[in-house]
Image (tube, rainbow, N blue to C red):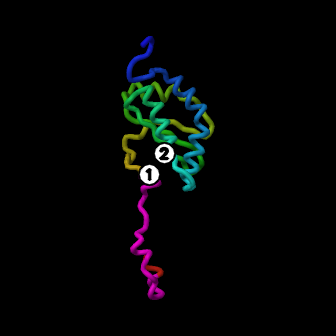
Amino acid sequence: MFGRRVGGDFNPRRFWSWFSHEAAGLANSIEALARGEADAEWALIGLNERIRRYDPNLEADVVRTLDGECHMTLSGGTTESLSALLSAAPVMNGWRFTPRAVLADPRRVPFKVAPQPSLDAMAAPIEARHDAYVH
């Protein structure tokens, strides 16, 4: 009611303060997801719920790069809110924050729904030596 507008927090420093406390847990959950040990969906949902307090149209995605760095991309929202949030981002070891590239492929297959080999092809017994090399 007092000093709070509906639909947004409007303080990027508040988001980044929260994020700096949660960054290690988020990085650990992404690493566990990459190893196939756990599902990091809960961490990404929590991140997006928090970021939408700043701007309801913003969305964040986090991936682990090959060098072990966490890369958080932001998309949606207004250009002003996106640039204000990114310009307030702290410098953190092991983290990089960027807007999602316009030309980047937005289709990202979540680990748990990635294509699996067909059980029909795997269930058939190997009948000859060359069958083992067909698939």
How far across and how far down the image is residue 103, in percent? 37, 44
Report the residue at 50% width, 26% height from top: 87
Depicted 126 relative to depicted 21: above or below:
below
Q: Magenta stretch containing residue 117, yes or no?
A: yes
Q: Magenta stretch containing residue 121, yes or no?
A: yes
Depicted 89 relative to depicted 35: above or below:
above
Disc 2 or 1, which lies upstream in sequence? 2
Q: Is residue 52 left or right of residue 31?
A: left
How far across and how far down the image is residue 31, in percent? 58, 49
Amino acid type for the residue under numbered disc 2: Glu
- Report crowding for label 2: few under 14, some 14 to 19, many 20 or more residues within 10 A (C-alpha): some
Cα distance in 3D space between marks 2 and 1 = 9 Å
Q: State the residue in front, 119 or 21.
A: 119
The quadrant of the picture occupied by the N terminus is: top left
Do labels 2 and 1 touch, CB within 8 Å?
yes
Amino acid type for the residue under numbered disc 1: Pro
Dot 1: what SS? loop
Q: State the residue in front, 78 or 3.
A: 3
Res. 56 mark: none
- Report crowding for label 1: few under 14, some 14 to 19, many 20 or more residues within 10 A (C-alpha): few
Dot 2: what SS? helix
Residue that mark 2 sits on: 41
Region of the chain picked out in magenta, as a range: 109-131
Q: Is residue 80 left or right of residue 32?
A: left
Residue that mark 1 sits on: 110
Report the residue at 58% width, 50% height from top: 32
How far across and how far down the image is residue 85, in percent? 47, 27
How far across and how far down the image is residue 57, in percent? 37, 31
Depicted 119 relative to depicted 11: above or below:
below
Task: Report the mark closest to the observer, 2 or 1.
Answer: 2
Q: Looking at the image, which residue sits at the far front?
A: 1
Report the residue at 37% width, 40% height from top: 102
